[in-house]
Amino acid sequence: MSTVESNPVESDFLASLLAPAAQTAEGHDLWLKARRASALERASALSVPTTRDEDWRFTDLSMLYRLKLKAADAGGQVDSAILTTLMFPEATTRLVFVDGHFDRSASSIAQEEKVRVGNLEQALRDSAWRSTLGEVESRLATVARVEHDVFAAANTAFLREAAIVHVAAGAQLGDTPIQVINVATGHATGSNPRVLVVAGQGSGCTVIEDYVAVGGSAYFTNSVCEIAIGPDAEVHHIKLQREADTAFHIANTTVLMQDNSRYRNWSVGVGGRISRHNLHVVQDGTGIDCDMHGLAMISGRQLADTHSSVDHALPYGASRQVHKTIAGGSAHAVFNGKILVREGAQQTNSSQQSRNLLLSQRAKVDTKPQLEIFADDVKCAHGATVGQIAADEVFYLKSRGLSETAARNLLTYAFAKEVVEHIPVASVIAVLENHILEQTRTKEA
Amino acid sequence: MSAVIQNLVNQPYKHGFHTDIESDIVPKGLNEDVVRVISAKKREPDWLLEFRLKAFRHWQTMIEPEWPNVKYPKIDFQDISYYSAPRPKATKKSMDEVDPELLRTFEKLGVPMHERAALAGVAVDVVFDSVSVTTTYKEKLAEVGIIFCSFSEAVRDHPELVKQYLGSVVPHTDNFYAALNSAVFSDGSFCYIPKGVKCPMDLSTYFRINTQDTGQFERTLIIAEEGGQVSYLEGCTAPQFDTNQLHAAVVELIALDNAEIKYSTVQNWYAGDEEGKGGIYNFVTKRGLCKGFNSKISWTQVETGSAITWKYPSCVLLGDNSVGEFYSVALTNHHQQADTGTKMVHVGKNTRSRIISKGISAGLSNNSYRGLVKIGARADGARNYSQCDSMLIGDLCGAHTFPYLQVANKTATVEHEASTSKIGEEQLFYFSSRGIETEEAVSMIINGFVRDVFIHLPMEFAVEATKLLGLKLEGSVG
Amino acid sequence: MIKDNASEVLKVQGLTATVDNREILCGIDLSVRAGEVHAIMGPNGSGKSTFAKVLVGHPAYEVTGGMVRFDDADLLELSPEDRARRGVFLGFQYPVEVPGVTNGGFLRLAYNTVQSARGKEELDPLEFDDFIREKMELLEMDPGFLERSLNAGFSGGEKKRNEILQMALLEPRLSILDETDSGLDIDALRIVANGVNQLHTSEDAIVLVTHYQRLLNYIEPDYVHVMENGRIIKTGDKGLALQLEDRGYDWVAQEYRERAA
């Protein structure tokens, strides 16, 4: 994303994307206003990426740039019966955002000691939040870097409403997840969902960040999720991207970790015409441990692109990453995973695997796992494979009486299941497994 | 402990002498006239001058690549002399007439020329600065129809072959340095293996840059006709100057049905001093085209020299069932930077490729592996296996791996594995507790690390390469 | 086999050592004579593995006091490789993996280095091959081991057998076997112990460092020492090992404290 001249379609898109942000100047606190303003300034100075940018070589957004988007001033109406089907029963706290706007009536917030969950707009006015606002201020729009990311900058330029999860030091939410549902109603809208999770020292929580659609036509979701994990804290983060097949979904997840903290991520993407997930984990302390499990299951003309980076800055860090893609039809899966081990990050133990399954003749995958290592006492390994379902495995199943199709579906399912099965929320596993089963049945090319 | 290892890797450059030979040098600078002068000096036919001019005009429209993971000040292409030749005394009829100073130079380098060539049984072409000075064993090779000569001689004696294949694998538009080379290349080696002939001996070229502020732009072309086989070796050295010198070669290989070309390089250009001053910029384009059914091209490289190396010997696997291989050891020390790897482009059906890359980083150096495996939509049953291992010596160096896997065929199988290791205190202690000295332990670990690559070198070169790694990595234990 | 007139192989007096300025060995006294087998037992963290590593000169430990005599030499003055050449051998608890270096090549280099230091004949690859195969039979090892990378990807049992194979090759005067029984199943334990017993003669001495009594059913010790907090706090015969098996370590420590008070 350089600042060179871009063509009119691209610059018009950016201008119209940012226009509403500039119009609404009234606001709340000064610090938030300042952050919006500087993000707007940055976004206006950048240009939107094209396939000429190395980081976007395979992901052509020109279709998005030709869309005439309108900002959703308020959330659309969503049938509560439909919403109910989207909720995971384990989550007693749910925040519902429709087209980026908080839907208070659809949300439910369980009151827990030492845990604050709510919409930013209310939090700024609510006295119950007062003691936690300092930490919100220090983390919101500072964890995610916007200098080189025009989409994250644009999101921040609109920052008014956001799902805020604040877990105080020592608070353990156990197996009770918090679900943030972002519903898109379609109709050429552009929305900027935002999530902030702050986990205090020694705390533990599970957050489900969920993107769903109830409308059909093309629309644009431009989300940012910031997670700040304090010393010895543990966050489980499940990102589900179940957008419509017509959607453009661009997401930035940035995780900032302190000493001895743990982060476990599951990112599953099945929707979107074009989806892109930028996942950055910064290990800003010693003895940090993170693992990431990614799955993109796509078909038709879908493109799913994941760019991840893990930044090991200090000693004794560990990271494990497995990213799997399954592409059928004419789908295109892209993965770029970077492991950076900085000078002095001795005793880092890092592994990264990119596993890709092509189901059809027209599907393709581009993967680039990369290691950049500046410390000598480290153990790093990465691997990548691209292939189809192993013929001898199919044969084995057939020899046990399964049909060719059934054998292939079962093996595809098994490939995907490995990513999904350790998600700590049973109903999420059930929903995803159902989805995978359905996909293997109906979308096999 | 780290002091021990630092000592082990800090060996002075042994080929850093400069030979006083009168040279015929074209003044610094580059424009169309210089291109014409080079062509005229070499008495080239018009079609070749046209090729050069076309390349030069295209080069002027290009910008230097910035994507490699290397850093260096901008090169002033007008501050380089594009042609330097040892001034000929008279036309040489035999080796005895070659400038004795030159022969001594190659003796110092350990080049098996002259009688030593006969003993070693290797045919050698020697390129000094930009010009091929002598080719041994020519007659014997001619008996079986093999042409092995300098590029200039090939232009003169076999223009139809040169015309047919020059630029067919690396077009003059390919990249910035290939375009530059196409405009100003001076000499290099040419090799033609006729149908069904297995070359009876290894062919070898030694390259040396001697003059300060000259660039070396050699051009190598090897063609193996149906069923032909050849093993070709290339060695490179340069004297020590504290200015940087540019080396931008182009190598093109063409293998037809069932033909096999094995190309081995031991690159030990001057790497600059301990502060990173001087040294060669080694920006090279090497590519082989497996044009025929069941053809095979195999690259083996041992890269220990150069201040900066930017090099991706590649294979285009066009013929069905063709095979591409890349075996590489790249060692960097002090301020050296290497961004090297390969491209395997699978076009034909059932094509196979194999990549084994071993990077060793020491001192303040940076060593990057960059490799592309591309499987085209029609490459049914294509297979690739890549393994990239890095070893770090000391904690001030960097090792980087950038594999690009692009697959557009579902029947393809592509596997990439990479690992990073170090020579650690515990390993060295284990050796010493069995009575083995640290120095010997380091050399054993390094040799073990590179073994998978060295077994693919011809015996002669394997010995030389092992010695070279030893020179770079061993020394007095402090 | 205790013989009254046997020469003293190892004499340790008041040995103290630290790692990162923490004292791990706090004054160890030990005398080992030719032909003897000593077992050093103790709970985790008692310093027994440290003691073994200090004897072979591991650079992570700093000797801060005391003396160690090996035959007529001041052991602490010697480099690790000189100790090995003179016949001190450590069978590691966790042998390191060295990918790329073949086991066979490594064994031959170690063997020839030690042989030449002792003024004995070195073996060329073919002779060595015959020689090593014979030794491998003793440990029921497959010759395929020689082609694999040194310890890389070896199972726990394979690593331990490879250590004892090196002991067989280097013919040490003093063998220190650090937790050689850990990670071994019963068959492997029997094979390893059998190998050690066959290698042991009246001319060399063995120090077994172990956590469990199990190994001592197979290799019978002449002396059993109990270590705690960097000291040997009790010495007895093999009966002591059985007592430890029954009653644990606490009572020994209790007894020691009472004596000290």
Image (cartoon, coloured by chain):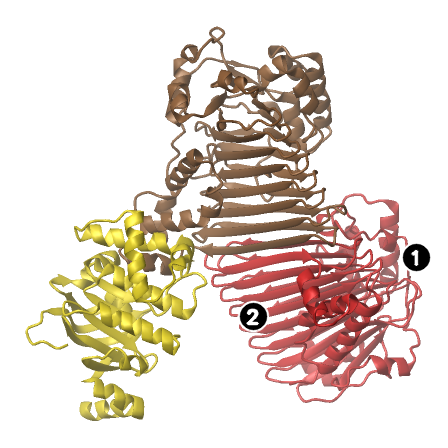
Chain colours: A red, B brown, C yellow
- Is residue C144 visible from the viewing direction of this image? yes
Vertically, is A409 above or below B304?
A: below
Task: Please state the total of marks drawn on the protein image.
Answer: 2
Vertically, is A194 above or below B288?
A: below
Left or right: A244 as drawn, with respect to B114: right
Vertically, is A222 above or below C182?
A: above
- Residue nearest the observer in this picture, C246 or A62: C246
Kindly identify the amino acid type of the residue bearing the numbered disc 2. Answer: Asp
Left or right: B275 as drawn, with respect to A306: left
- Residue nearest the observer in this picture, A233 or B457: B457
Q: What residue occupies the far top of the structure in this picture? A: B90
As helix, strand or loop, the secondary structure at mark 1 comes to loop
Snapshot quadrant of residue A238: bottom right
- Residue nearest the observer in this picture, C232 or C40: C40
At horizontal 36% and vertical 54% (from top left) the residue drawn is C104
At horizontal 28% and vertical 82% (from top left) the residue drawn is C217
At which x and y percent is residue B308? 53, 37
At horizontal 43% and vertical 36% (from top left) the residue drawn is B459
Which numbered tag is attached to residue A289?
2
Q: Are marks 1 and 2 in contact (CB under 8 Å)?
A: no
Q: What residue occupies the far left of the structure in this picture? A: C5
- Residue nearest the observer in this picture, A94 or B118: B118
At horizontal 75% and vertical 88% (from top left) the residue drawn is A110
Q: Which badge, 1 or 2, comes first in the chain's sequence?
A: 1
Snapshot quadrant of residue A444: bottom right
Which numbered tag is attached to residue A146?
none
Distance CA(mark 1)–CA(mark 2): 43 Å
At which x and y percent is residue A389? 70, 61
Q: Which residue is mark 1?
A: A68
